[in-house]
Amino acid sequence: MKESNRKFQVGPLAVCVYDTKEALGREAAREGEAFIQEAIQKYGKARLIFSAANSQLDMVANLTASSGIDWNSVEVFHVDEYVGLSLSHPASFGGWLKRNVVDRVHPARAYYLAGDAKDRESECQRYAELLSLGPIDVSFLGIGENGHIGFNDPHAADFSDLQTVKVVTLDERCRLQQVGEGHWPNLSSVPTQGFTITCPALVNASHIICCVPGPQKAEAVRNTLEGPISVVCPASVMRTHTDAKLCLDVHSASLLSRKDRF
């Protein structure tokens, strides 16, 4: 069956609904590749931020399989990390970046948040300084079931945050999502705090590609697109960006009220 996609705008935010998560991953990677090539041509390198999440696996698999990217000219960051976890822990988001991006394509530089850093404030400052060394060309983001981007849960998100990286307490729904996705055996095993790049820093990238497949994300997608631009749903901040794209599948788009748009 021929795959199709439906496109519409919510303010400046472009939204595309694909028939399958596989099609979503292919098209998001294709657009990401074009942005990376553009940055390398313009600046001599591309600097990328990745959300380390199941929702990104199809996109990342396609992106890292591409022969059209000079990974020797690419620097990569990850969005967040659990406090207390080393890079070698199976649930580490830095470890996810290493397995799914770095070990596959060997970019010029990979910058990891040290979840097990003894001095958390110093670690926030260290990572913030690395992020500030040049423009971020693409933020590859996801949306949590509670509407978060990164570990910016509703209670911790701040669209005017003066910090670039901070430590936050994770809300229960965020932690339950990690259990539901198979990363932890139960709620009590999930760390209660995390490092995260803040909302303003994530949306300060030249381009945003946000991949959100699956029925578990339908409520968050509806709140992102149809609710107010508010920290009640942190992902809604993407509606303020002039070059952001939200990539959905039919399942994550299933609760949108204007189904005639797709």
Image (cartoon, rainbow, N blue to C red):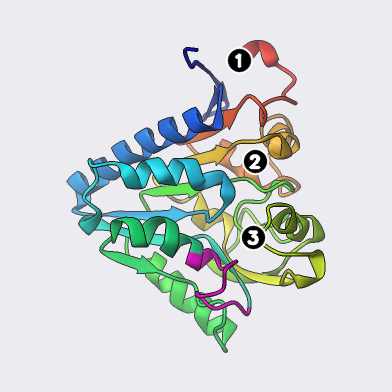
Image location of residue 63, percent across then percent down? 36, 43
Residue 87 highlighted magenta (yes or no)? yes
Considering only vertical position in the picture, is 168 above or below 222? below
The amino acid beneath tag 1 is: Phe
Where residue 236 is drawn, which disc sits there?
Answer: 2
Residue shown at 21% from the left, 50% from the top: 70
Residue shown at 63% from the left, 80% from the top: 84
What whole-number distance in Å separates the C-alpha atoms at marks 3 and 1? Answer: 30 Å
What secondary structure is marked by label 2?
helix
Which class describes the residues within 10 Å of circle 1: few (<14), some (14-19), or many (20+)?
some
- Please give the range of residues in magenta: 84-95
Residue shown at 35% from the left, 62% from the top: 103
Where residue 262 is drawn, which disc sits there?
Answer: 1
What secondary structure is marked by label 3?
loop
Which residue has dot 3 on it? Answer: 151
Which class describes the residues within 10 Å of circle 3: few (<14), some (14-19), or many (20+)?
many
